[in-house]
Image (cartoon, rainbow, N blue to C red):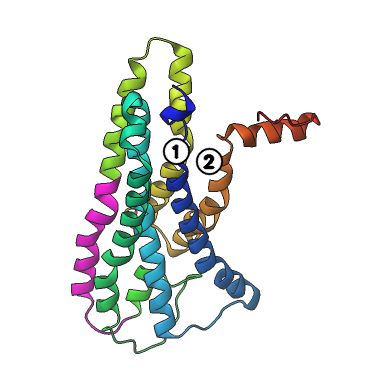
Amino acid sequence: MSEQNGTEITEFLLLGFQDLEILVGTLIVPNMLKIIWLKGAFISIPGCIAQSYLYCASGSTECYLLAAMAYDRYLAICKPLLYNKIMSQKLQYSLVIFCWMLGFTSTLITMSLLTQLKFCGPNIIDHYFCDLSPFVDLACSDTSVLEMEIFILSFPIMVIPFILILVSYSCVVIAILRMSSITVRKKAFSTCSSHLSVVIMYYGSLIIIYLVPSSQTLNKMISVVYTVVTPLFNPFIYSIRNQDIRAVIHALITQQPIHNKN
């Protein structure tokens, strides 16, 4: 497989994912630092709803983008000769735009129901941002409709993209195992390692928080992983696969001059 046959995830998909990570970091980190510094902070209910919407929309978009990237890896490994034809620039743009639009529209119903809740106080969230679950717990009105809507939406937002990722990587693993050369197998698997590690970190955190019963303290600690740690390390995870970046790192370590291929 050559570079033009997709040994790396397409640049525009990574760009769309990178912009999303910047949004999440900008949304969460400043307020978190403020809370740590002041040992608490105040936010209005409309402000909390806005933060909750942006956070949920960003999380939904990330699920869709990770599924799109898994499809990209499927094409690169299982359909290498057709990769350039299928994964055209137009398709890349369409995938990123569709993921962003779907992510930010799929949570509008949830936010509209959230605005109809009544909050009687004391409105104290034991968290460093307005996560949906602890925010809904503060409501003194009936939340059954909202909770049912959240449960139903979790399937198209989280479950279906995760199934698509599993199917894509099942095909990838089968294709890699059919390769005769061990060297080619390692090279093929290495092209998926960056994306696979991000998927494991992201979905692992979501499963622990939303599916496994745990304390609020543990949930906050895990939340730090996918809101702060994961966006922080994602550029390193993906960049280390880039040959130019690796050449620069090697040159810095060995103190050798960098040779321009051009």
Give the amino acid type for the residue marked by disc 2 in the picture: Tyr
Above or below for 78 versus 105 = above
Question: On the image, numbered disc 1 is attached to which residue?
Answer: 9
Residue 25 horizontal/vertical position (percent): 53, 62
Q: What is the residue that sits farthest to the right in this orientation?
A: 255
Nearer to us of marks 1 and 2 is 1
Measuring 39% from the left and 72% from the top, which residue is drawn there?
A: 52
Is 159 magenta? The answer is: yes
Residue 201 horizontal/vertical position (percent): 45, 45
Above or below for 170 versus 48 = above
Quarter assignment of residue 124? bottom left
Q: What is the residue that sits farthest to the front in this orientation?
A: 262
Q: Categorize mark 2 by other alpha carbons within 10 Å: few (<14), some (14-19), many (20+).
A: some
Figure quadrant of the N terminus = top left
Measuring 61% from the left and 70% from the top, which residue is drawn there?
A: 33
Q: Categorize mark 1 by other alpha carbons within 10 Å: few (<14), some (14-19), many (20+).
A: some
- Check disc 2 and report its element: helix, strand or loop: helix
Quarter assignment of residue 138? bottom left
Residue 246 horizontal/vertical position (percent): 64, 33
- In the image shown, does 84 or 29 lie closer to the viewer? 84
Measuring 73% from the left and 29% from the top, which residue is drawn there?
A: 259
Question: On the image, numbered disc 2 is attached to which residue?
Answer: 238
CB contact under 8 Å: marks 1 and 2: yes
Say which label, 1 or 2, has the lower sequence index: 1
Segment tinted magenta in the rendering? 139-161
Can residue 213 be seen here? The reply is no
Q: What is the residue that sits farthest to the top in this orientation?
A: 180
